[in-house]
Image (cartoon, rainbow, N blue to C red):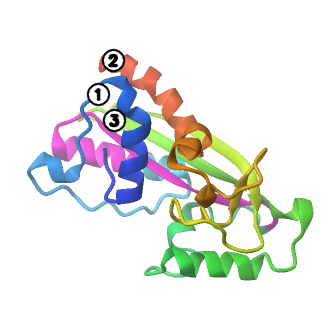
Amino acid sequence: MATGNEHKKRELKAILRHEGLEILTPENIGRELPAVVEDGQTFAENAAKKAVLTAAASGCICLADDSGLRVEALKGKPGVYSARFAGEKATDDDNNAKLLELMRDFHGDRRKAEFVCVIAVSTPDGIVKTVQGVCPGRINDKPLGSNGFGYDPLFIPSGYGRTFAQLSETEKNLISHRAQALKKVYCLLKGFGLV
């Protein structure tokens, strides 16, 4: 699993735990893995790049994701720049504050948004396949809840009256964009002979 993000590691492991897979993270490999610059224009480009480079360096089949928030009124922003929306060293609070400021004059349907997750699986020799998961919702007018990470305190998934940060980990892992993508990953792993 090509990620250094502790929140993503926990989510991915929690969702995949029933598949009977041994999931390794970069610190389990025992050698230095390359830092991957996410310079793609799409989630798929970034996920594929991370998966291919990490698989080649580790010698293992590698799963990588790129995910983020797309806000309709902001023409899809923050998109692939979700983690660095307020700047390269931005914190989650910085990104949320910037989003709320930009959304200040938008109300009702103008607050529609969706979380998107693309997961790529690559073999060490560069055979790569991707799947995508989407969770529609809207942006709340203030942060609520203390669970999750990123934009979770602002994002209310469709059909719910609470933000991702107000949902339990179990509830979120049933409906999130990452959960939707991971449901499709099983077929990719089957194709690679892992399950």
User: Is there a contact, CB below 8 Å, between mark 2 and mark 1?
Assistant: yes
Tell me: residue 26, above or below residue 181: below
Q: Residues within 10 Å of mark 3 (few under 14, many from 20)?
A: many
Residue position marked by numbered label 1 in the rendering: 21
The type of residue carrying mark 2 is: Val
Residue 131 appears in the figure: no
Residue position marked by numbered label 2 in the rendering: 195
Residue at 61% across, 65% down: 145
Mark positioned earlier in the residue sequence (2 or 3): 3
Q: Secondary structure at mark 2?
A: loop
Q: CA distance from mark 3 to mark 1?
A: 16 Å
Q: Secondary structure at mark 1?
A: loop
Residue position marked by numbered label 3 in the rendering: 122
Q: Position of residue 189 (x, y in %)?
A: 37, 24
Q: Which callout, 2 or 3, points to the residue nearer the camera?
A: 2
Q: Which callout, 3 or 1, points to the residue nearer the camera?
A: 1
Q: CA distance from mark 2 to mark 3?
A: 15 Å
Q: Is residue 66 magenta?
A: yes
Q: Is residue 99 magenta?
A: no
Mark positioned earlier in the residue sequence (3 or 1): 1
Q: CA distance from mark 2 to mark 1?
A: 8 Å
Q: Quadrant of residue 17?
A: top left
Q: Position of residue 45 (x, y in %)?
A: 48, 49
Tell me: residue 187, above or below residue 31: above
Give the residues in magenta.
Answer: 48-73
Q: Secondary structure at mark 3?
A: strand
User: Is there a contact, CB below 8 Å, between mark 2 and mark 3?
Assistant: no
